[in-house]
Image (tube, rainbow, N blue to C red):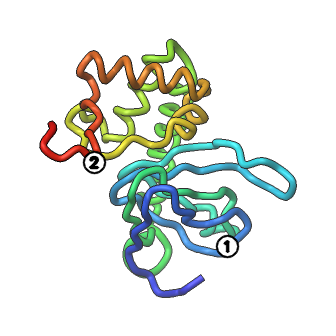
Amino acid sequence: MNSVRQTQTHPAGSRIYGAGNPGQAWRVLSGAVRLDRSGPGVEPMFANLAVEGDVIGAETLLFQHYTFEATALADCVLSPWPEGDGAPAGESLLAALTHSETRAADVVALRCGQAVERVTRLLFLLTGGRAPQLADMPLPSRRDMAEITALTTETVSRVVSQLRRAGILPARKQRGRPGKS
């Protein structure tokens, strides 16, 4: 891995890093990152989600290698963490740990309750707590949303359609039909 510590951008769907690879920790400045547990002969399995303000890859500070596979769930910008030179201060580590535990609780909540509640909570999490209809972020794939919420792809698709009909999510933009709105 390059030792130059500079901000990186990753388009939705791109792999940020793989489990077992050497690297450094990152703070998510914008967007969302999906973390999967993977291994030889094992299908990747959803493990966690990181959104704006979260730190990913902190395990590299101790083990020099990533534990999870990270994929951009939405277009994202990452900044090296800790910010500045040297090891992170105790307060910075404590804040990152506390934030990480809060995020873990948020992710567990995404896998409990009614389908519409799960999908709505996911959308609020991905938009930083803003109402989904105000977000201009494209939705993650139905497959990603289903794996994160422990629902089927079909159920997520029905819920998204229901949220669009209710006006909670904006209507889909029509493509390739000039003159129509």
In this rendered view, identify the residue nearer to me: 181 or 127: 181
**Residue 91 location, quadrant:** bottom left
| In the displayed structure image, the side of residue 160 where residue 68 appears, left or right | right
| In the displayed structure image, the side of residue 107 where residue 125 appears, left or right | left
Q: Is residue 117 above or below residue 68?
A: above
Circle 1: element type: loop
What quarter of the picture does the N terminus occupy? bottom right
- Which residue corresponds to the image point at 39% horizontal and 41% vertical from the top-left? 139
Residue 95 visible somewhere in the drawing = no
Label 1 Cα crowd, 10 Å radius (few <14 / some 14-19 / many 20+): some
Q: Is residue 25 above or below residue 67?
A: below
Circle 2: element type: loop
**Residue 38, how many percent across, how many down?**
75, 53
Mark 1 = which residue? Answer: 64
* Kind of residue indicated by mark 2: Gly
In this rendered view, identify the residue nearer to me: 120 or 152: 152
* Kind of residue indicated by mark 1: Gln
**Residue 163, how many percent across, how many down?**
34, 21
**Residue 2, how many percent across, how many down?**
55, 86
Q: Are marks 1 and 2 in contact (CB under 8 Å)?
A: no
| In the displayed structure image, the side of residue 160 where residue 112 appears, left or right | right
Mark number, residue 176: 2
Of tags 1 and 2, the one toward the viewer is 2
- If you read the primary sequence from the N terminus, does the residue marked by circle 1 or circle 2 appear first? 1
Q: Is residue 151 above or below residue 79?
A: above
- Which residue corresponds to the image point at 37% horizontal and 17% vertical from the top-left? 162
Residue 129 visible somewhere in the drawing = yes
What quarter of the picture does the C terminus occupy? top left
